[in-house]
Amino acid sequence: MGQTDLEVLIDMGFERARAELAVKKSGGLQGALNWLEESQDKSLEELQASAASAATAKADDDEEDDGSPIPEGAKSLVCNDCGKRFKNGDLAAFHASKTQHTDFSESTEEIAPLTEEEKKQRLEELRQKLAEKRERQALVDKEEQKRNEQIKRKATKESQDMKEELARKEQMKEAARKRQEKLDDIEAKKRIKAKIEADKAERKRKEEEAKALREGRAPAAPSTAPAAAAAAPAASKPAASHNEARLRLQTAKGNVMKTLAADATLFELAQQLESENGVPVASFSTTFPRKTWQAGVDFGQTLKEAGLVPSAVLIVN
């Protein structure tokens, strides 16, 4: 037994309510397909409301054909704007509301029902249109997804560039710090060497004076000049290093020389040692005079306040 027009439409994937409206409005498969094609952009609620409104407007009329009657002698209505034919006035009115076409005329040519072959062809055409519509939508979705991925990649790249820029700046700062430390070490070595030379000259002068006294003679005059020359750097050095402290630090891993600003705190010194050795500093102490600075108590003092300027030897605990 063959399928009804309603069953054919439902098998094609149309929802039952919409298919029932199409069959009711058109009276046959051909008109139903036309109606479904023209109303595909309207929601089911809109179509049901329109059908209810039309039913209310015709409540007092006698039931004759399905749809508005065509004048006597006419077999169909033709839209002169596009050439489409309609079986009844309802279909023509729906077409007019959908397309804004207003030029219709009567025709004595009766719309023949679709043959089985024509039905199959029409169904295939509608399936193709639906498939093409889905394909177009898939392309739109794919393009949208592609744009979203591009935006995401761009945001990720910008974030990565910012991270690389920060890392590059940190590397530059670290390199500058190491260069400065190297220069400070060189200056400290120069000052230590100058002091050693001055101390040697001073010891030599004193030895010569003692020798002259033992021999019962006055110290030689030329020997005072080197002593004065040797004393000059020693005398001028405190003034040159008045704003800095040269420290020799006795740690568990050996002696370390450091030169810091006089207003640097013991806490800053402890932090430097901890970052270099990986061992927290609990205290600093000196052997002569005997003095100890404890972490959390005395580390807020500056090197100048602690009496470690211009130079000192500290034991790190």
Image: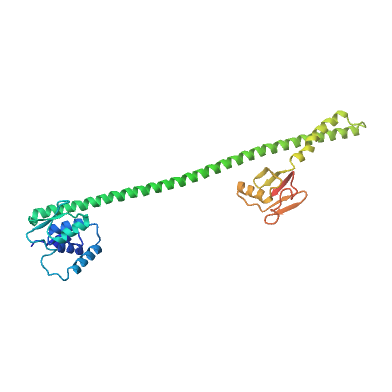
In terms of depth relative to the viewer, which is nearer, 91 or 189?
A: 91
Q: Is residue 117 visible?
A: yes
Q: Residue at x 80, y 38 (%)?
A: 235
Q: Is residue 97 above or below residue 197?
A: below
Q: Position of residue 73 (x, y in %)?
A: 6, 59
Q: Is residue 12 above or below residue 189?
A: below
Q: Residue at x 76, y 34 (%)?
A: 197
Q: Position of residue 61 (x, y in %)?
A: 14, 69
Q: Position of residue 309 (x, y in %)?
A: 74, 45
Q: In the current view of this chain or complex, which residue is farthest to the right? A: 216
In terms of depth relative to the viewer, which is nearer, 34 or 210?
A: 34
Q: Quadrant of the N terminus?
A: bottom left
Q: Position of residue 49 (x, y in %)?
A: 23, 65
**Is 167 left or right of 84, judged from the image as shown?**
right
Q: Is residue 7 visible?
A: no
Q: Residue at x 53, y 42 (%)?
A: 168
Q: In the current view of this chain or complex, which residue is farthest to the bottom? A: 60
- Count of numbered circles on the image: 0
Q: In the current view of this chain or complex, which residue is farthest to the top? A: 222
Q: Residue at x 25, y 63 (%)?
A: 46
